[in-house]
Image: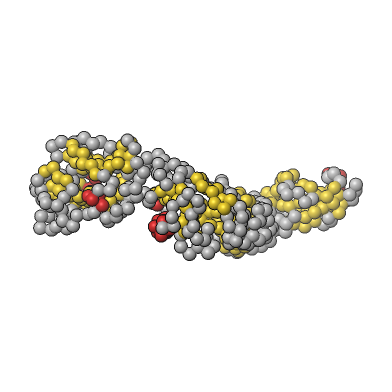
Amino acid sequence: MSTCQPPRGSRSPQFCLAFALVLLAAAGASPALAQSPLRTLPGLTDIAVYEVTSTVTRNAFGPNSTELATRRSVLDNSSRDFSHFAGENYDVYFSDSDGTPNVSGEFLTIEATWTGSQNDGSMNVTGAELFINGQRLLANTVASYRLGGRCVPGACNANSRNLAVDGDLTFSTIPRFGATDPNNPADRMRLTLGFPRPAGTALTLSPVTPVAPGGVLNLAWNDVGATSYTVGVVSGPGITTPVVLATVGCCGTSFPVPPSIPLGTFRIAVAAGNVVSNTIDVEIRFNFSPPVLAPVAPVALGGLLTFIWTPNPAVLYDLMVLSGPGISAPFRVGQAACCIITLPINRSIPPGTYTAAIVGAGIQSNVVSFQILGSASGFELSATSTIVRPGLQTTLSWTDRGQSAGPQYGIFAGPAGAASLSLVATQQCCVLTVPHASVAPGSYDVYVQDSNGVRSNRVTIRFDP
């Protein structure tokens, strides 16, 4: 994965540089933007603008037409892409969302000049569409716009811009952007439009499981109608610029992983023309055993929480909080390579007991619980005797957590060493007497929990026969 050497059946390495540039762009952009250029959408046959003067006229252009590839430096009666009325001239081109010309842009910009009466108003664009594989997709977004320099009420209304994307191509729904100044060639009205995408144009690369050096990497993606797809590495150990692996047909391929490849996380994408997929992480590593997360000590608000797990330097790990006060679904709170994450505890975090796990390459560690204390004071549980014989008793006592903890405390008990204990009693602060006769013989773990979910230490008590 460190050189541009395609496997058998692929095209030559001359594609390396071109695809590297595409991948560099994709690495710094969201997948939605990376998939957006209009000109290279598979199956696109034409782009049309509907203009209304006396009748509705469909003005169509091929995706590779000169008109769409360039913005005219002069827009007048002798230099225009189309016109249906003297003095009213239109220019159409691919652009960015702000109307900046870009042949690989995600948007279509329509500029117009109208040097007639400002009371008439112009920019008579009632809609625009993509025509893809026989499917008609009308523009549905006005990304940006500009009114004419001569703008008077009744013939110039910024709110009328949305009439160009309302799905109605009749005469009755056209914007009114006023008129332009005939003495100012730079004065142009403008609409920059966005379009929906047809089903199947989102190129999606499927996740893969970790693979060891010397193994085989299997990749798969969906069909977007392209005749060929190029696979490349965006980043990874030893990868300083994106590298092409192969150009192949639809819709998958396999690569032998060199035995000498560096261990670590490689990020891979696939492209069809300028349509670039999401990136996926491929873990190259020897150790496939789950990481082991060490117990986590309680910490007070404003302190530091530390998570440590067993080493595997080839994996990037996510720290996931699974449950706790106010948490309805697991979420990621940190990411790091081997093998420690330290987090400051914001004072707005609710005190209580939380659970967490480490996930690396899709493999989850054991689950640990940890406590966020409402204050720096400890929550200590003690027993007058940890061995109780017939006829005797032990007394449990614990730290008063104060008014914010509530008047009631839960006492949790269960077999010694058990991962979780059950609630067995509710008690006001802060003493509980347990006679031998009330408990079956055996060893038990006990802890106390306040109303915020903050737990004390565990105490083990043995009740002899």
Q: Quadrant of residue 213?
A: bottom right
Is there any visible trace of residue 262 in the rendered image?
yes
Position of 292 with respect to 105 (left or right) is: right
Is there any visible trace of residue 28 in the rendered image?
no
Please report the residue visible at 51 percent of the width from the left and 47 percent of the height from the top: 253
Q: Quadrant of residue 212?
A: bottom right
Q: Quadrant of residue 22?
A: bottom left
Q: Nearer the viewer, residue 465 or 85?
A: 85
Q: Nearer the viewer, residue 445 or 410?
A: 445
Q: Nearer the viewer, residue 152 or 246?
A: 246
Q: How is the image coloured?
A: secondary structure
Residue 242 x/y as whole percent: 46, 59
Position of 99 with respect to 7 (left or right) is: left
Above or below for 240 versus 463: below
Position of 198 with respect to 123 (left or right) is: right
Residue 37 x/y as whole percent: 34, 50
Position of 249 with respect to 332 (left or right) is: left
Looking at the rendered structure, the number of numbered marks drawn on it comes to 0
Please report the residue visible at 70 percent of the width from the left and 48 percent of the height from the top: 410
Q: Nearer the viewer, residue 264 or 243?
A: 243
Residue 98 x/y as whole percent: 29, 54
Residue 371 x/y as whole percent: 65, 56
Please report the residue visible at 36 percent of the width from the left and 43 percent of the height from the top: 42
Please report the residue visible at 28 percent of the width from the left and 51 percent of the height from the top: 94
